[in-house]
Amino acid sequence: MTQTTSDKVRQQARPDDRSKVALRILATTDVHGHILPFDYFTNTPDRPYGLARLATLIARARAEVEDGASVLFDNGDFLQGTPISDLTPHAGQAWQGAHPVLLAMNGLGYDAASLGNHEFNFGLDWLQKTLPEAGFPIVCANAALRSGPTPEDDETLCPPWHMLTRKLRDDSGNITTLRIGVLGLVPPQIMTWDHAHLTGRLTCRDMVEAARAWVPVIRAAGADLVIALAHTGIGEGPDRPMMENAAQALARVPGVDALVGGHSHRIYPDPDKDRPPHDRLNGMPFVKPGFRGSHLGVLDLTLTQEGDGNWKVTGHTSDVRAAADIPPDPDFCRALAPAHAQTLTLTEREIGRTSTPLHSYLALVRNDPATQLVNAAQRMGLTKALRGTEHEGLPVLSASAPFKTGGRGGPGYYTDVSAGPLRLRNITDLYPFPNTLCGLLVTGADLRDWLERAAICFRQITPGTPDQMLLDKTVPGHDFDVIDGLSYAIDLSQPARYDLAGTLVAPKARRIRDLCHDGAPVSDSARFIVATNSYRAYGGGPFRNLAATGLIHTSPRPVRDILSDYIAAQNQIMPQAHPVWRFAAMPDTRVVFDTSPTVREHPDDLAALQAEYLGTTPQGFARFGFWLCPKQSQPVDNSLSCESPI
């Protein structure tokens, strides 16, 4: 019997006869300049993270598969975050080599990378000058120097995608060529967070819109597989335009085969959770490997060639490999030794001295001397800048937040500066971001709204119920702005007026009470000047873009340089907190919060708060309780002991 063409096609398409290949995707994300296992803020070696430890994991993961059967990607936020990335490779620091982070990544042989939002922190000119030092393609499809009618018509800052080829051995022993399209995406919120750098020079499209436009183009160019490097996390709520965390929506874009996520500094799959949200990503192969080099993401794909010659992902596993107990790669460390030495020289420079310690262990529960020090420096800088202007004479306030408050960073992620010399590394610890100083003309109504948005970091507390968790762990500590120059109370019996996206969710709620300036109530129409950073001025976090109507001053200098000037001018500082905010009293109500166990080295601070130690959580945090109506002696309710999973 003669075999027809259709018979041959059906025979080729039988599952037993289809060719199969395996491809391993290795991924890093949100490294934030942590290339060596060294903490430049505390001058501490042998930290349990960093690209040097991942270098060892990368070599092992590559050796586990055939030559050429793996690809290595980074998902953005690699150029900012530590002194070796934020100080050494910048102007005036006597460093003559390539950017240390790119030097490290070139040595590891990355195949491609995408941009994260923090790549834009130092300005577009600096970024365009620095990116060519990368020995690998950097892709980003939705950030454009010039927008066209459609995404495909945009003049993008970086190539939107790149094609890789791999020679892979199939399950029959034959060599086949696989063409891998790599697409890059960045949150469109860069236009808010780095507005001062990017306005008028860059535009940014919705990530999903860009992906839907470019994936067919990549497929038409011959890609057998499309991998999206999306600097985004898993968001909540329905899909909507311009989402910051759009992983779920991107998982539904036709033609995307695998997704690498990031941005939120979380881990996926999370080994601490019994039921990872596979259903939320439609079964999409997905990995999100933490931050600061804490984990290596490993996606193993099985691809099967269909009867029409196209390849399809027919199986996958997702894994994250922790760096904590992995020895650093010695060759990697030797290659970075000159940059490391230069960074140590810079960061050890003495700026001044402090008579008392500065730490952030209690920055979310009391008036914090470190936050107030930053506020004082900002206030001084702006007051000087306004001399001789039409705004001289208006009350100058200052808004800042604590930056290192544990959370996703773990029980070691706090600022702790001992009494004695204040070195440049301590300044970068107190103010780790390259934000610049802005001055805003605001009203009393604006101030009330600002503080309501800052107060969302606290959970609603039921009066009379003991041992309720105080902090909302979904809200980062750096959203808790304190406005120096005012006094006010925070009423925790009220629900949060806004959510983390800045959406009004409880219109009748008002947590901010007794708002005063110089002892007098603040009217809605009163006018003030607020010194703040560029990120907050343009609406970073859940805050309004007050710069759109009230910007009266911008400085090209980073706030941390202004902080250095402030400390150097005094030489010896004596940080002591003065009253700005307080919790409204609630009789018979005790709240519970988690912080670093190291806070116990500051017993006077704990005593002033009347905080009682309750134990250590499974995550390594110390748990404390204190009464919202002080000087009470009440029994302890252990229902929220340190073993509680909250």
Image: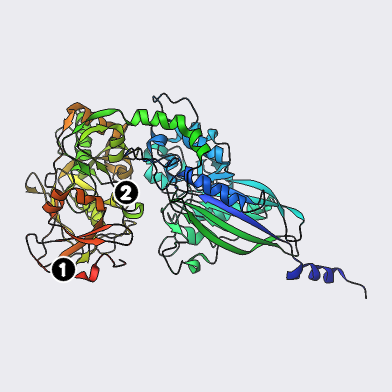
Q: Is residue 308 above or below residue 79?
A: below
Three-letter residue code for mark 2: Tyr
Three-letter residue code for mark 1: Val
Q: Residue sitting at 25 percent across and 43 percent down?
A: 416
Q: Residue sitting at 84 percent across and 68 percent down?
A: 8
Q: In this view, does 161 lie above or below 631?
A: above
Q: In this view, does 145 lie above or below 97?
A: below
- The C terminus, quarter of image: bottom left
What's the distance in space between the residues labelled 1 and 2, CA to CA?
A: 28 Å
Residues packed near mark 2 inside 10 Å, few (<14), some (14 to 19) or many (20 plus):
some
Residues packed near mark 1 inside 10 Å, few (<14), some (14 to 19) or many (20 plus):
some
Q: Are marks 1 and 2 in contact (CB under 8 Å)?
A: no
Residue 630, quarter of picture:
bottom left
Report x, y in % for residue 97: 49, 27
316 or 386, nearer to the observer: 316
User: What residue sits right under mark 1 in the picture?
Assistant: 636
Pointer 1 or 2: first along the chain = 2
Report x, y in % for residue 473: 31, 59
Report x, y in % for residue 299: 56, 57
